[in-house]
Image (cartoon, helix red, strand yellow):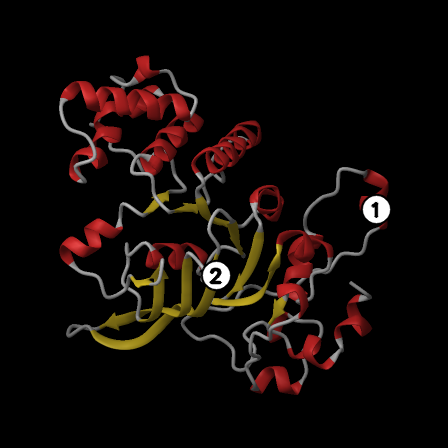
Amino acid sequence: MSALLSVEDLKVHFPIRRGLLMRQVGTVKAVDGVSLQLERGQTLGLVGESGCGKSTTARAIARLIDATSGSVKLDSEELLSLRGGALRKMRRSLQMVFQDPFASLNPRMTVFDTLAEPLIIHGVASGRSELEERVSKLMKQVGLSPGFMRRYPHEFSGGQRQRIGIARAIALNPKVVLLDEPVSALDVSIQAQILNLLRDLQDELGLTYLFVAHDLAVVRHVSTSVAVMYLGRIVERAPGELLFRAPKHPYTQALLSAIPLPDPAAERKRRRLVLQGEVPSPINPPSGCTFHPRCPLANARCASEAPALIRGENGHDVSCHAVEEGRESTVLGAS
């Protein structure tokens, strides 16, 4: 069975222009060859440090920014070549929830206007009574009282605004919902409520999620499978529990070692992998493996040759020369 959403070798490069004539003097390789497969009804977590390109990947898939090259297929239909009416029609099937619940809603539009707008644009509902009925149902689905539909965004809390954003995303019964750090701007207690809401909606409506986040603890709670990004590329991907139980790539291991454990005794005993330095600039990425300047396993090959993403057992893929050569256990211990 083919994947519902298939991304192949997606690249998003931004030109750097300077001078009076705005000549191009460089390129920001924000996304540099990302490939993903998302099965129907599943959740793929896309994780990495800030600036690794995960949000840019989601926006390129949604056609909110233009991809430089690659392929994005939804139900075997190529999305990157769509224009005009065909692109608008596609947006019914691919919706997005944004990170900032304060900036993603129009402050001059009531909740009713916000939720009714996509229904009107796509001809899903017409007439005041039908629109009110549909908006009322959407608000109930996300845990808000329909009595609030005449209110404006400034009258809601951050968590309530994000519920409105989720209601807007599911209004057209999409096949895929792209979630760009949907809980990172919220308090921890509210995060749990929103994550539980997303899982309930997935079960109820059969939704498929691409969940972008930097918090691996959050990703573990919601994701069926996980892909780890570093400097515009996927370095490891695997079924969720397999990746958290037996991470292979040193970068993934470092991310997981930074998650605090609830047991103080276990926290004191466990071994941490602390990375040195900062994430390199995508304007001038390192040669070979882009992670090699920070990697405790790097050798001369890593500095000169970029590793391929090698298909492993049980769908556990990794892009690392050390793993390929069997060197990882000598430094990090058995995973």
- Residue 294 image-quadrant placement: bottom right
Q: Amino acid at mark 1?
A: Arg
Q: Position of residue 47 (x, y in %)?
A: 54, 54
Q: Give above or below for 143 relative to 334.
A: above
Relative vertical location of residue 197 with respect to residue 152 in this rendering, above or below? below
Quadrant in which residue 179 is drawn: top left
Question: Where is residue 197 drawn, in percent x and y?
Answer: 49, 31
Callouts 2 and 1 close, C-beta under 8 Å: no
Q: Is residue 265 left or right of residue 297?
A: right
Image x and y of residue 305, in percent: 56, 85
Q: Residue at x 33, y 59 (%)?
A: 60
Residue that badge 1 annotates? 268
Query: Can residue 103 be seen in the rendering of this structure?
Result: no
The numbered mark at residue 1 is 2
Quadrant containing the C terminus is bottom right
Q: Residue furthest top?
A: 147
